[in-house]
Image: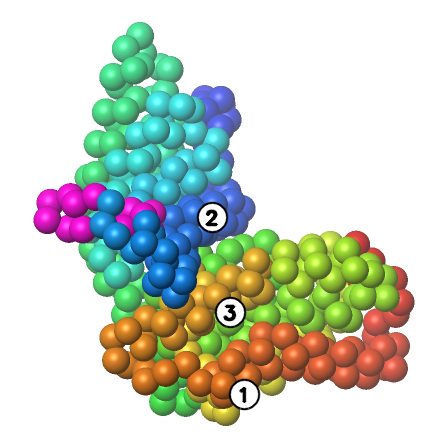
Amino acid sequence: MEKFKEFLKRKDIEISLKRYGIDALGAMAQGLFCSLLIGTIINTIGTQFHVPFLMKTVATIAGTEYTVGGLATAMSGPAMAAAIGYALKCPPLVLFSMITVGFAANALGGAGGPLAVLFVAILAAEFGKAVSKETKIDILVTPLVTIGVGVFFSWLIAPPIGRAAMWIGNLIMWATELQPFLMGILVSVLVGVALTLPISSAAICAAFGLTGLAGGAAVAGCCAQMIGFAVISFKENKWGGLISQGIGTSMLQMGNIIKNPRIWIAPTLASAITGPIATCLFRLQMNGAPVSSGMGTCGMVGPIGVYTGWVSDVANGAKTAITGFDWFGLLMISIVLPAVFSLIINAGVKKLGWVKDGDMKL
């Protein structure tokens, strides 16, 4: 057993929740951002601003036509797997082999491809690391083992994982349609909390394909956390803190949350209020790339995802037009209401003596 532990340490194979549930999951979201999400944004820019180069077919592969954005979107599987491999500190030959693994897992995982990629990529990466540089023909052995293990597990577990993820996502979305008030609260709070924790809310939303009203509630929760912390800590952190938290990440407050968890009350309660407002009053739906549901105002990806969903819905006839009420609802849910509710609730929390000046200093 000791020799095995030494081997794992030498190979930098760390079987832990942090390595797989935080590092790998967060990296997967970055891979999705750099492929699927960027591709969606490129396509939207092309169609909305009538940019010929972005609208025309630049490649035809096996009868399928691809635009520039389409090519980026098609590479989501390889991008996720490569990002996971990087997070797991894979040596070069393993890392490069992950491209094939990601393609296989995403393709066989179907609608639940992102979750399938997460599991398969972790297995392939760790097996690849285990054999890396252990033989004199490393350039053959390492890619063969990494790709072999990856494709085998893609065939074995990617389809059921994909179906399970799709089923869970559909269940959440169905429940939100059925009970928009209660699910609006639940989805908004849970996804918002995940955004602030050192895990990836974006990857979670992508893994379960959260769109529609559930996606709108998730956007509301994430925006409440980011905008909430940005405004209630303005006295301590000024404009730099407002920007870094408001369009960066509320995760910056994790150190302060550990010191005084009560600073989390205002943004979390704000998300519990804005979530059902989004689902019941504004009927805010996020029908863009699912990863956008868990991004909030980070780079304004959440609102951009809502907008790209509107564009898509108009194009396919699901929505007649983008109205002024749509824009008003998006503005209120993304920025105005999170700021107002967080400030009011935080004032009450401060009056109770639970939070004091300086508790949210970055």
State the SS at label 1: helix
Question: Which secondary structure lies at badge 3?
Answer: helix
Point 42% across, 52% down: residue: 38
Label 1 sits on what residue type?
Ile
Q: Position of residue 16 (x, y in %)?
A: 50, 43
User: Is any atom of residue 218 visible in this view?
Assistant: yes
| Whether label 1 touches label 3, CB < 8 Å | no
- Of the two numbered discs 2 and 1 on the same chain, state the one appearing first in sequence: 2
**Disc 3 residue type (three-letter):** Pro
Q: Earlier in the sequence, mark 1 or mark 3?
A: 1
Q: How is the image coloured?
A: rainbow
Q: Name the residue beneath numbered marker 2.
A: 30
Cα distance in 3D space between marks 2 and 3: 18 Å
Looking at the image, the residue that sits furthest to the left is 63
- Looking at the rendered image, the quarter that the N terminus falls into is top left
Would you place residue 103 above or below residue 261 in this image? above
**Foreground tag (2 vs 3):** 3
Disc on res. 277: 1
Res 235 quadrant in image? bottom right
Q: Which residues are magenta?
A: 59-74
Query: Is 266 contained in the magenta span?
Result: no
C-alpha separation, residue under disc 2 versus residue under disc 1: 30 Å
Q: Quadrant of residue 134?
A: top left
Discs 2, 1 touching: Cβ within 8 Å? no
Q: Quadrant of the C terminus?
A: bottom right
Q: Residue 303 shows which numbered tag?
A: 3
Rendered residue at 63%/60% (across/down): 247
